[in-house]
Amino acid sequence: MSYSGVKLPEFDTLVARHTAAATQMEELAARLYQELTGAGLDTTPAERIRKLAAQVGQEAEDLRKRQRIVREMERHKIAFGASIATGSIITVPDSLAEAQGLLDGTLAAKAAKAAAAGDKNALKQLQAYAAKTRDPSFAKTFLRQLGAKGGSRSCQPRSPLNCVPTPQQEVPAPRRGKPKERCDYSQRLCPRAPTQTIPRTWAMPSSMIW
C-alpha cells in the first residue's frame, strides 16, 4: 500500500474497519474449512479466503503502526500537516521506516537542543536514540531539525547525535598594509591572513559523547 499522508478522523475509522475485516475473514475461513472437511469436500476455497485474510491482516498491522506514529506526532505536538474544515491532514512518508525515522529524528533533535541548554534529563533521552544513528531517515531529519540556515555542519558521519550548535567565532583582523610579497594562503605561507569568518560548526560537548 502507498501513502502520502492521512486524514483524521477518517484514518482512524479506516484502521478500525480494516482490522475488523481481517478478523472476520479469518473466522469465515476457519468455519468454511470445518464444514468442507466435515462434508468430505475440497477445502481450497477456505484456504484461499485464509490467505486473503492474512494479506488483509498484514495491511491492517501496517495501518495500526502508522496510526501509532500519527498519535505520537499529535502527543508531542509535531506539526507535519495542516488543519482543514473537516479535520486534519498529517503527512506520512510512504515507507513505514521513514515515517518512524521522521518522528524519532524530530524528538531526538528536541532532546539535543534541551541537552545543549543543560537539561540532564534531555541528555538521557538523547542517548536512547543512539541505536538509530545509522538510519538515513533518522539522521536526515535530526540534522535538518537541528541545523541553522546558512550554517555549515561538521559532524562525525557515523553519529549525527554528536552535532550540537556552537557559537560563531571571528578571526582577528590583520593590521592594514599591503603585503611586501605574494602569499599563498592555501599553503599558509603568509605571516598574516585576511579577515575570515569561521563557519558555524557542530560538535557534541565531551560530556555528551558516549
Image (cartoon, rainbow, N blue to C red):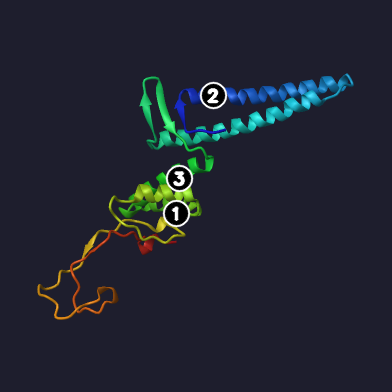
* 38 lies above or below 102: above
Q: Which label number is shown at residue 14?
A: 2
Q: Counting residues from the N terminus, which is met first, the one under dot 3 or under dot 1?
A: 3
The amino acid marked with disc number 3 is Asp
Label 3 secondary element: helix
Q: Which residue is mark 1?
A: 127
Q: Residue at x 37, y 35 (%)?
A: 79
Instruction: Find the residue positioned furthest to the left.
Output: 177
Q: Which residue is mark 3?
A: 104
Rendered residue at 18%/67% (across/down): 195
CA gap between label 3 and label 1 equals: 12 Å
Give the x, y percent position of residue 204.
36, 60
Instruction: Pinpoint residue 121: horizontal percent, then vertical percent.
Output: 39, 50
**Of all residues shown, which one is farthest toward the right?**
40
Residue 35 image point, x, y percent:
83, 19
Kind of residue sitting beneath label 1: Gln
Q: Is residue 175 above or below residue 43?
A: below
Disc 2 crowd, CA 10 A, few/some/many (<14, 14-19, 20+): some
143 vs 191, nearest the viewer: 191
Position of the C terminus, as image quadrant, is bottom left
Viewer-nearest of discs 1 and 2: 2
Q: Residue at x 14, y 72 (%)?
A: 174
Q: Amino acid at mark 2?
A: Leu
Real-space Cα separation, disc 3 to disc 2, in angstroms: 25 Å
Compared across the picture, whether 103 is left or right of 148 comes to right
**Which of the numbered marks, if any, corresponds to residue 85?**
none
Q: Position of residue 168 (x, y in %)?
A: 24, 59
Circle nearer the N terminus (1, 2) = 2
**Which of the 4 image quadrants contains residue 48?**
top right
